[in-house]
Amino acid sequence: MQIILLTKYQKKTFSFSSGHQKALMAMICGFVLVLTAYFYIASASESQSANHSTVAEKELLAQRIEIERMREKTRNTLDNLALRVGQMQAQLTRLNAVGEHLAQKAKLSSPEFNFDEQPAIGGTDAQALASSFTQDQLLHDIDALDEQLNLREKQLELLGVFSANKKLSKEVRPAGLPVEKGWLSSFYGYRADPFTGKKTFHHGVDIAGKSGTKVLAAASGIVTWTGKKSGYGYLIEIDHGSGYITRYGHNKEITVKVGAVVKQSDVIAKMGSTGRSTGPHVHFEVLRHGKKVNPRKYLYSAR
């Protein structure tokens, strides 16, 4: 088979034999295969690129969500810290006002006791050991400082009450029966133990009465202990200052909390028979400078 081609202008002819035709067809087929492979590779590359783009977009979205979550958590933490600091600043303002009032009552000069100035503090150069606070450490320190401020506020309030009223200076000394109604059922000193019958020393006095009878503070002070204690049952301890501490044992119910400021004759509990007890009564102790003393002389003092 022979193919003849005619040109338009030069009037020339080209002829191809069957051998040339096979070679041409082979070239055309090869060219088609090359084009097909090129488009396939290009399509696969484009698909792979699209997959990579989708994965990258998902990772970017996840990172943005995590960043926003961390921002929200940080904002909440800062808001909580700002709230706590604001509350502590308000407490400090009250403490300063009470302190200035007491300083004036005590006739202290301003340069010696000025609440408007920072207290003088210092320390050695320890930059090599310095480190930043963690969030948990900072929150812990704020909580501890808050507790100290609460206690100092109560103490200053009590001191202010004592300083403002001269009559209260007498109330730090225990006086009168520590119950609304009752009678003395056991004295201070050696006695036969009600459970064993053996001779033992009784460090307080017992005042018997009806269960639920009101137990009264023998003097003004700050409640320093409430709770169950071996032998005493439900016990209350009050620090009155000037070296006086009183204790009230075997209560049925305690109506005050640690840190509470109480005045003389305030109700602090209800009479009961908890702990080592044979019936409803109050075990009353008086400590003077850390030593247990006979409460009897205080029971019959005038309030």
Image (spheres, rainbow, N blue to C red):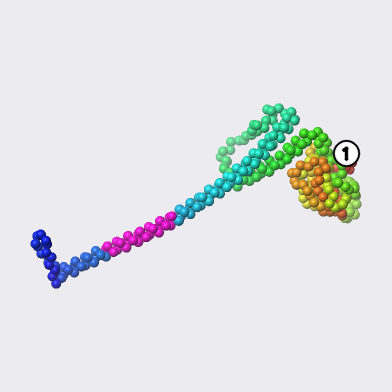
Query: In this rendering, does residue 183 appear at all?
Result: yes
Q: Residue at x 76, y 38 (%)?
A: 158
Mark 1, secondary structure of its residue = loop
Furthest residue in direction front, as rendered: 8
Mark 1 Cα-neighbour bin, 10 Å: few <14, some 14–19, many ≥20 = few
For the residue pair 73 and 198, the one nearer the viewer reads as: 73
Give the quadrant of the N terminus. bottom left
Q: Please state the extent of the stretch shown in magenta in the rendering.
A: 34-57
Query: In this rendering, does residue 289 appear at all?
Result: no
**Prevailing SS of the magenta stretch:** helix
User: Horizontal placement of 217 versus 128: left or right?
Assistant: right
Q: Quadrant of residue 96?
A: top right
Furthest residue in direction bottom, as rendered: 1
Q: Residue at x 73, y 37 (%)?
A: 156
Is residue 53 located in the magenta-colored stretch of the structure?
yes
User: Horizontal placement of 24 versus 236: left or right?
Assistant: left
For the residue pair 199 and 179, the one nearer the viewer reads as: 179
In the image, residue 164 lies at what x, y percent? 77, 34
User: Horizontal placement of 36 versus 295: left or right?
Assistant: left
Q: Amino acid at mark 1?
A: Ala
Give the quadrant of the C terminus. top right
Question: For mark 1, what is the residue?
Answer: 302
Q: Residue at x 61, y 35 (%)?
A: 124
In the image, residue 228 lies at what x, y percent? 78, 52
Is residue 243 located in the magenta-colored stretch of the structure?
no
User: Horizontal placement of 94 versus 15: left or right?
Assistant: right
Counting the numbered discs, the total is 1
Furthest residue in direction left, as rendered: 11
Q: Residue at x 74, y 28 (%)?
A: 107
| Residue 255 to residue 125: above or below | below
